[in-house]
Amino acid sequence: MPTVYLLDYVAGNIRSLVNAIEKLGWTVDWIKSPEDVAKADALILPGVGHFGHCLSQFSSAAYREPIIAHIQAGKPFLGICVGLQALFEGSEEDPDVPGFGIAKGRLKRFDASTKSVPQIGWNSAKTSVKSDNGEPLSLYGLSPSSKYYYVHSYAVPYREGELEKDGWMVATGTYGTETFVGAIAKDNILATQFHPEKSGAAGLRLIKAFLEKRKLSPLSPESTNASKATSATGLTNRIIACLDVRTNDAGDLVVTKGDQYDVREKSDSVSAGGQVRNLGKPVEMAQKYYEQGADEVTFLNITSFRNCPVTDLPMLEILRRTSETVFVPLTIGGGIRDTTDPDGRAVSAREIAGLYFASGADKVSIGSDAVNAAEELYANGGKPTGKTPIETISAAYGNQAVVISVDPRRVYVTSPSDTTHHTIHTKYPGPNGEEYCWYQCTAKGGREGRDVDVRQLVQAVEKLGAGEILLNCIDRDGSNRGFDLELIRDVKEAIKIPVIASSGAGKPAHFAEVFRETHTDAALGAGMFHRGEFTVKQVKDHLQEEGLLVRQFEA
Ligand code: 1PR
């Protein structure tokens, strides 16, 4: 089998890239030292996270010069995400650290005044490459009708003609009003700001074209059939399928689903509370939702498997198997905190996250421990300690890798002066006609109410370096009544990082409603998919009929 070389410098989820390459019939060999670079024919440089951190690591490990030599020798090179950024002269993210300077330009942070930053989601990579007789061509399999998965806060602003005059072919995306470089190619070099290994069949097509050195090819007629729908940001409306996973009473790992977080069957009289609802097997269900067009899959380990050695975490195997066939981002949550193994060894949250990333996860989601971190931050006068899992994981793997799962519950009050917390005037009064409520954050799956409101929590975790909020709502969970729009608006107003609306989806129209009525960045469903009431595809078809931009599954 042909071989491609990968440089692994702990860049987060490298497993998915290996899986993608192997699925295409190639093998991966690893660059383990700077001397190895010279033996590589084709070289892939993946990367996520902080520009300065990555580039400094290349330099201190003596990789910088061999990589530049590889590129200048005309050997095939593919840079992904920070692997693209490295080719440019530098980045506002860390102005003192130089890039390779192979392409002219510097990265700038996206303007967050009218949109969420980081950009997380599916956007375009459009080119205007033409043949000598004016026919549009595909650059490394890129298609104008396909969408690609981006996750980044900094980008190279696109100025027409500038890169082209140096011989680069460019594919662009537009986020809000900013058009940025999505991919560049010249001679032996290809680099993408998006993650091809996370962009479904469209991304695999690009990797295949790179491996086969097929730079330009004719565009198929269907690939020019781009949807006419638009969105304010340029991103598609992102749909996430969520699988709550736990061991059932027979000891098997199953997908379950609660009503207001109660996952036991009510009709079942076994002991107190009935059996854990069993809705299917995690890996098979993830695969099914991928094929229905889910833009991401989230696994929440809703029991923490506390007594299990970290290296035997059952979710590791689920991730490994899922990432073999599911080429969209995977998030894993549950039990991510500093802990102690049964043998007494201290294990840091960062170490646990590292195991998950190495097994195929792109993001980790932190629930209970985020409430602790927020409380600590306020107790410390708003000064971060640098020691919380949110900080340590985001410092090592980038903000985009840290999702905070928030489990709020309504607390009704007659007047805002009845509480010190931030209240909203609600259209849905409480049991005694109360017209105001605040959202109390909880830990341990809703079992522990804390003296922290949802605004305080999301603002604290944003400050600590979280990249995204998974906004559940205990009152709506499993209710099929639709999302709590008041909660989502309240949270969106408070922060700049993206928000995933969760809890309450019962039909496709609820997704259209949440995208129209709030500025949410994504919406998540669980029960309605697991019970087979609707498919992800039906949700997307409905959104499309309503004129909302979606990414459809490509086989
Ligand atoms: O606290 O860091 O160990 O993480 C535990 C994680 O497990 C948290 O993300 C917490 O939300 C989740 N969790 C804990 N207990 C439960 C439970 O149900 N008993 N599940 C639970 C939370 C919420 C959703 C659900 C949506 C959509 N699940 O993600 O999928 O509400 O459901 P719907 O569409 O059917 O309404 P830690």
Image: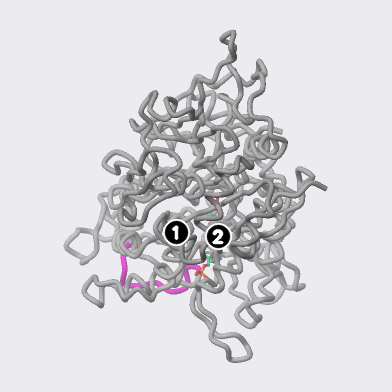
Q: Is residue 405 visible?
A: no
Residue 82 at x, y percent in the picture = 48, 50
Q: Are marks 2 and 1 in contact (CB under 8 Å)?
A: yes
Q: Is residue 163 visible?
A: yes
**Residue farthest to the bottom, as pictured:** 344
Q: Is residue 194 above or below residue 538?
A: below
User: Is residue 435 rendered to the left or right of residue 472?
Assistant: left
Q: Is residue 254 above or below residue 249?
A: above
At label 1, the amino acid type is Gly
165 or 118: nearer the viewer: 165
Q: How far apart are the two marked residues, 2 and 1, measured between alpha carbons?
A: 9 Å
In the picture of the structure, the residue carrying the numbered disc 2 is 12
Q: Secondary structure at mark 1?
A: loop
Bounds of the magenta segment: 445-453
- Mark 2, Cα crowd under 10 Å, few <14 / some 14-19 / many 20+, is many
In the picture of the structure, the residue carrying the numbered disc 1 is 398
Query: In the rendered picture of this protein, how many numbered marks are placed on residues?
Result: 2
Q: Secondary structure at mark 2?
A: loop
- Rendered image quadrant of residue 441: bottom left
Residue 315 at x, y percent in the picture = 66, 66
11 or 281: nearer the viewer: 11
Q: Is residue 402 above or below residue 304?
A: above
